[in-house]
Image: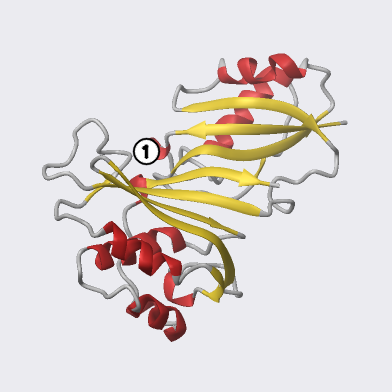
Amino acid sequence: MRNVKLIIEYDGKDYNGWQKQPNRLNIQGEIENAIKNVTHEEIDLIGSGRTDAGVHAFGQVANFKINSDFPIEKMATAINSQLKHSIRVLKAEEVDLNFHSRYNCHKKTYAYIIDNSDQGTAIYRNTTYHVSNPLNVENMQKAADYLIGEHDFTSFKSSGTSSKNSVRTIFNAKVLKEQERVIVMLTGSGFLYNMVRIIAGTLVEVGLGHIAPEEVKNILEAKDRKKAGKTLPAQGLFLMNVEY
């Protein structure tokens, strides 16, 4: 038995999220079928977490177990030959049999990308969220600083979450300006359903001057979803990397 770890990049625009589901195009199912075509084995692909419909990834991590002796150095190329170009396996490597891409994860980093140009973009419309009014990045960073540490993030989760425990740790929260883009970068122990998109929506409200930066502390303490900003659309969200 061999345990294979994959680093995966994907454009989530045309997919109904990571999780395998009948009669709906999904990333997990597409990769499982590709691996089956290569190894001639039925496998169970375990992801580090589920990304929602329309969400993208630069560094999703997954693993699966096989008996096949297919050469590991040829695995990524072979799997990619069976996939749509919107999904790419960047790397395949053998790992310890006890490695579990979800349970062994210590940190994840997500980025939410905001196009802050006047007119928006045609080319990158499926990978950014457009805000035409100028954003005050300095105030957004002041607000983001209140998120760092261990908190109950009930105010920043959607009602559909399956997790009963809303306490998470944010290790790093950065708001970056790159030309006409504003990027919200969050590294945490884990994230609740829509948590990053709600945080990004709240920080946009701060950037527009609708919420004072220090008010984010009160929003956290309120544990009330209605106090935070709106949930931004999925297309601006990227899973950047997963740390073990």
Say above or below: 192 vs 79. Answer: below
Q: Is residue 164 above or below residue 106?
A: below
In the picture, which quadrant includes the N terminus? top right
Kind of element beneath mark 1: helix
224 vs 39, left or right, is left
Q: Nearer the viewer, residue 141 or 72?
A: 141
Can residue 198 be seen?
A: no
The x, y position of residue 104, in whole percent, is 74, 51
Left or right: residue 89 compared with residue 153: right
Q: Residue at x 34, y 79 (%)?
A: 215
Percent coordinates x, y for residue 4 in the rendering = 75, 31
Q: Count the marks: how many?
A: 1
Dot 1, crowdedness within 10 Å: few (<14), some or many (≥20)?
some
Nearest the eye: 192 or 106: 106
The residue located at (39%, 83%) in the rendering is 218
* Residue drawn at (45%, 22%) of the image: 85
Name the quadrant containing residue 232.
bottom left
Label 1 sits on residue: 13
**Which three-letter amino acid code belongs to the residue tagged 1?**
Lys
Image coordinates for residue 23, horizontal then vertical, percent? 48, 40
Residue at the (85%, 39%) spot, across then down:
97
